[in-house]
């Protein structure tokens, strides 16, 4: 099968690969910590520490203030982290950002609940009232409190559906829709902070800081979550050209558009796609590029695992497409060596096939280890054979049911091998390769552990998790 990209175009794409400055990551991390320190400094300047010794009522109220302020700051950091700001996304990658977003989110929510409890206890002691009556009085008497209650309910819905047990029972589309309530929670919380927040009322420095952070979060969302995707979608006019079934449960969607070479896309990245084919078009789904981008064509490949991915098989040529992206750090920009080894399992072959086509390496300097249950489950078999013959790639198809006796990346037929020894056998001298891994999370965990045990330096291991 001929490649979707000629060797000349592939070389051109490789020359466009850009390297993300490592100090970007440091800048983002320092900015996040600095924001928390500023909030604490503003609390201290507002007599926050002195009030701790002024009596029980002031003690609880002051502690409630600082927990609420830090909770609000962390909430805004969450919004900015997940706003797809290029400097942040390219520094961390969406999988790591999602993990940090989760940690920051739970910390923010816990502090928010603590803020509510401490403030109510402080007001109850101050007014010599019982807790129930004080809760009702605070909710109905203070400006913006009803909106704050609605914000807390929205954020609670987001947190509850983010717990792993709940996430496993939800479709990706439902989880993603519920997660948008975080924006509702942030918006509804603003009036309460402005109208009743002691810092807003007494400190001009605090007002400047909080308005600046809110404006930054708003601009990030409007520009990078809404404006840039819409502009790119309109500019490139992407439509479906054809749909090809690769296996009984895997399909590829071929897309055409104008000037696609102007998209800052690299082999191994993914886009969030919305196919305008009827009901459900508003739900975006992430799909990896399965071929190196060309000036007129993109290709994505997905396994039919949910409602949206099953719809791909029924897309008609000419269907218009909205895109967000490109996203992802599973690219060649952080390569250390001249050799590459790809380890894929199942549909994880998708970004690695793109990388094999788009990366620069000499014949004999690339290895692909492709794990599948059976030969009929292999995707891109003919393409991989053609690519291997043309570019000198060593192919290893590792087939069979999974090993049941221990966590492993190997099939049952290789039970007598250790994970690391098997990897050394397939990729001799693995410590001299950049290793790219993609597949189900447990399988990736086993591969990464085996690679490190086989002597691979950590900086030469490249992975990106796509589980939500």
Image (cartoon, rainbow, N blue to C red):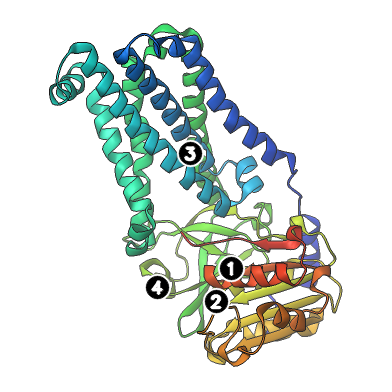
> In the rendered image, which residue does mark 4 sit on?
310
The label nearer to you, 4 versus 3, is 3
* Marks 2,4: beta carbons within 8 A: no
Q: Which residue is mark 3?
A: 78
Q: Helix, strand, or loop for circle 4?
A: helix
Report the disc number at residue 407: 2
Q: Picture coordinates of residue 423 (x, y %)? A: 72, 79
Residue at 60 percent across and 54 percent down: it is: 326
SS class, disc 1: helix
Q: CA distance from mark 1 to mark 4?
A: 28 Å
Asked whether the viewer can see residue 291, the reply is no
* Vertical placement of residue 269 versus 401, above or below: above
Q: Position of residue 298 (x, y in %)?
A: 60, 65
Quarter of the image for residue 432 reads bottom right
Whichever of callouts 1 and 4 sits on the residue coming sooner in the sequence is 4
Observer-nearest of 407 and 143: 407
Q: Position of residue 96 (x, y in %)?
A: 57, 51
Locate the N terminus by quadrant: bottom right
The answer for how far apart the CA atoms under marks 1 and 3 are is 27 Å
Q: Nearer the viewer, residue 204 or 300?
A: 204
Q: Residue at x 46, y 13 (%)?
A: 49
């Amino acid at each position: 099968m001929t490649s979707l990209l000629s060797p000349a175009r592939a070389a051109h794409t490789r020359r466009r690969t850009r390297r993300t400055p490592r100090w970007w990551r440091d800048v983002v991390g320092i900015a996040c910590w600095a924001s928390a320190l500023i909030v604490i400094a503003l609390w201290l300047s507002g007599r926050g520490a002195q009030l701790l010794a002024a009596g029980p009522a002031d003690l609880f109220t002051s502690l409630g203030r600082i927990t609420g302020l830090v909770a609000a700051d962390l909430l805004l950091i969450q919004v900015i982290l997940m706003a797809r700001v290029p400097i942040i996304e390219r520094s961390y990658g969406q999988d790591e950002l999602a993990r940090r977003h989760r940690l920051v989110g739970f910390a923010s929510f816990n502090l928010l609940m603590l803020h509510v409890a401490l403030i109510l206890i402080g007001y109850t002691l101050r007014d010599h009232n019982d807790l129930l009556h004080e809760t009702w009085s605070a909710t109905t008497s203070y400006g913006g409190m009803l909106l704050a209650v609605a914000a807390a309910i929205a954020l609670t819905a987001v947190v509850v559906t983010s717990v792993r047990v709940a996430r496993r029972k939800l479709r990706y589309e439902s989880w993603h829709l519920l997660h948008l309530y975080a924006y509702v929670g942030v918006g509804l919380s603003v009036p309460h902070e402005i109208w009743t927040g002691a810092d807003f009322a007494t400190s001009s420095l605090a007002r400047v800081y909080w308005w600046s952070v809110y404006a930054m979060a708003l601009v990030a969302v409007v520009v990078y979550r809404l404006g840039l995707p819409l502009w790119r979608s309109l500019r490139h006019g992407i439509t479906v050209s054809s749909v090809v079934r690769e296996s009984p449960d895997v399909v590829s969607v071929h897309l055409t558009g104008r000037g696609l070479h102007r998209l800052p896309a690299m082999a191994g990245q993914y886009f969030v796609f919305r196919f305008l084919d009827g009901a459900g078009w508003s739900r975006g789904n992430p799909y990896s590029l399965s071929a190196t981008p060309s000036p007129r064509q993109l290709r994505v490949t997905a396994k039919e695992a949910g409602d949206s991915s099953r719809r791909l098989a029924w897309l008609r040529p000419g269907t218009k497409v909205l895109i967000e992206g490109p996203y992802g750090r599973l690219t060649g920009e952080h390569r250390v060596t001249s050799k590459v080894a790809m380890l894929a399992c199942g549909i994880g072959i998708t970004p690695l096939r793109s990388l094999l086509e788009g990366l620069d390496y000499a014949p004999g300097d690339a290895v692909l280890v492709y794990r599948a249950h059976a030969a009929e489950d292999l995707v891109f078999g003919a393409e991989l054979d053609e690519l291997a013959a043309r570019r000198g790639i060593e192919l290893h198809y590792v087939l069979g049911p999974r090993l049941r006796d221990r966590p492993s990346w190997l099939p049952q037929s290789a039970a007598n091998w250790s994970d690391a020894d098997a990897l050394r056998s397939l990729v001799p001298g693995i410590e001299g390769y950049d290793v790219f891994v993609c597949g189900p999370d447990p399988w990736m965990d086993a591969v990464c552990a085996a690679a490190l045990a086989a002597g691979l330096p950590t900086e030469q291991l490249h992975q990106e998790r796509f589980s939500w």
